[in-house]
Image (cartoon, rainbow, N blue to C red):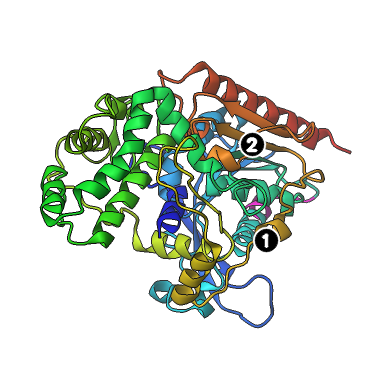
């Protein structure tokens, strides 16, 4: 399923080495925080560094873990580390249940819906509340006011950071929600906006680049109509597994679509190492070969192959193109399940003038059938709105929603300030949670300004907290 495959792209796997120092700890938390029928517990992992912490007045910087190993997010959230000294903060990265090592039922955690049913954002945030209470209790003296907590998160972690502040304002004093598509849900954002943003990044890099990608889908179909054409594409695109039928061709196109989205998400102004090593401004590199959409099909497809090679073979060490998933099993199982329950984000493409992709409508019926067949769950479309208020955030406060406008997920982000304390921070030339990454000599002025603005608001929130009556 095209749309289901693309829903996995909220996940980003990080491989960069950081050099950040932390202690790995575990806390025992309930499997079920909200009923009295299950007394099972499990060990939740968290990473902690108190090198610069002023235990008497320093804040707690708390990263709300995403859909993956917490070390990966820790290593790639350099902004938190950089400002911890300035604010004399305790740095904590909490792992999300059902990811990394934090498995409520160990290797059996994904066995059935009875066990998987405890994989929800609500349960995860309740884990975080327990951890914060434990950390605060450990530092409190009699009569002392707790240290203020500020939630940080990017992507799904940014959604959690915002919702954490909304649901638990007595626990979290403020939230930095970077690239958090909290409005990428039914009735909140048109389903084709995501791919409109993606398309604009390529079109702005080069008009010919966008036109070449648009033309490539029909070219793939035409070339692969015959067995000899499938063999030609297999050989010239250096596929690890030969194209044998229409399903294989569809899988190739799904893969290419995912790559175009992933490149837009990580279109950073410096070299980075994520799913694969990438150059600075990778989309510019991709588009260098896509210069004439009117070429014959085979010539056009070779130009597309050279562009896509920036993603899967920038170092030149990859022998063949593997179309299988790059995500680990727990990420696939965990996020795929969440995408069938709470996190149903309608995505569609229209093709033509709207975007550079083939037209794929949002089909909730077939999506539901997939989820029911795989997990025996019946999806609904309004769970997030009921839980967290949807677009009605007037009662919330102290949240910064930062979005890079090169990031496809900005389509579902909060792009306008909603009140004096619900602030939208736009980074016109920024990709996916660029502001949370470590500073770099190639950083643009807009992301430098964004980080200064975030520090300003944290300073204000700390002042308000300390002197609030």
Quadrant into which the N terminus falls: bottom left
Query: Would residue 139 be counted in the magenta stretch?
Result: yes
Q: Seen in the image, is 325 located left or right of residue 395?
A: left
Question: How far across and how far down the image is residue 133, in percent?
Answer: 67, 56
Residue drawn where x is 41% and y is 18% of the image: 441
In this picture, is 332 found above or below 410? below
Residue for badge 1: 382
Q: Earlier in the sequence, mark 1 or mark 2?
A: 1
Quadrant into which the C terminus falls: top right
Q: Is label 1 in a helix, a strand or a loop?
A: loop
User: Quick one: 48 or 192, which is closer to the camera?
Assistant: 192
Q: Examine the rendering and report whether any part of residue 43 can be seen.
A: no
User: Quick one: 47 or 143, which is closer to the camera?
Assistant: 47
Q: What stretch is highlighted in magenta?
A: 135-142
Residue drawn where x is 46% and y is 79% of the image: 112
Question: How far across and how far down the image is residue 65, in percent?
Answer: 52, 51
User: Quick one: 147 or 385, which is closer to the camera?
Assistant: 385
The mark lying in front, picked from 1 and 2, is 1
Residue drawn where x is 54% and y is 20% of the image: 446
């Amino acid at each position: 399923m095209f749309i289901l495959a693309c829903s996995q792209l909220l996940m980003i796997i990080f491989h960069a080495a950081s050099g950040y120092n932390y202690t790995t700890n575990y806390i025992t938390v309930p499997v079920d925080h909200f009923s009295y029928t299950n007394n099972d517990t499990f060990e939740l992992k968290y990473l902690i560094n108190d090198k610069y912490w002023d235990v008497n007045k320093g804040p707690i910087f708390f990263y709300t873990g995403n859909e993956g190993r917490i070390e990966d997010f820790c290593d790639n959230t350099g902004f938190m580390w950089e400002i911890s000294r300035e604010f004399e903060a305790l740095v904590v990265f909490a792992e999300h249940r059902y990811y990394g090592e934090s498995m409520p039922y160990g290797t059996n955690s994904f066995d059935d819906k009875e066990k998987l049913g405890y994989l929800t954002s609500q349960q995860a945030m309740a884990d975080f509340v327990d951890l914060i209470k434990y950390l605060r209790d450990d530092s409190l003296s009699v009569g002392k006011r707790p240290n203020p907590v500020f939630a940080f998160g990017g992507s799904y972690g940014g959604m959690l950071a915002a919702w954490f502040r909304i649901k638990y304002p007595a626990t979290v004093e403020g939230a930095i929600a970077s690239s958090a598509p909290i409005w990428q849900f039914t009735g909140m954002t048109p389903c084709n906006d995501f791919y409109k943003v993606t398309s604009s990044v390529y079109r702005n890099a080069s008009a010919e680049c966008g036109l070449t990608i648009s033309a490539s889908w029909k070219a793939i179909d035409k070339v692969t109509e015959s067995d000899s054409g499938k063999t030609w594409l297999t050989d010239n695109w250096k596929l690890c597994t030969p194209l044998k039928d229409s399903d294989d061709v569809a899988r190739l196109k799904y893969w290419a679509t995912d790559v175009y989205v992933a490149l837009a998400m990580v279109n950073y102004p410096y070299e980075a190492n994520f799913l694969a090593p990438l150059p600075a401004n990778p989309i510019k590199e991709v588009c260098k070969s896509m210069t004439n959409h009117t070429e014959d099909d085979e010539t056009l497809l070779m130009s597309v192959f050279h562009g896509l090679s920036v993603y899967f073979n920038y170092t030149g060490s990859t022998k063949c193109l593997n179309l299988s998933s790059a995500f680990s099993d727990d990420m696939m199982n965990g996020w795929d399940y969440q995408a069938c329950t709470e996190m149903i984000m309608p995505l569609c493409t229209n093709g033509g003038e709207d975007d550079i992709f083939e037209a794929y409508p949002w089909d909730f019926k077939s999506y539901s059938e997939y989820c029911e067949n795989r997990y025996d769950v019946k999806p609904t479309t309004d769970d997030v709105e009921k839980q967290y208020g949807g677009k009605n955030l007037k009662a919330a406060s102290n949240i910064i929603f930062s979005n890079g406008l090169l990031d496809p997920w900005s389509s579902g982000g909060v792009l306008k300030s909603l009140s004096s304390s619900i602030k939208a921070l736009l980074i016109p030339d920024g990709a996916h949670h660029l502001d949370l990454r470590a500073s770099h000599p190639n950083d643009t002025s807009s992301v430098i300004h964004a980080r200064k603005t975030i520090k300003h608001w944290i300073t204000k929130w700390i002042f308000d907290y300390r002197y609030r009556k």
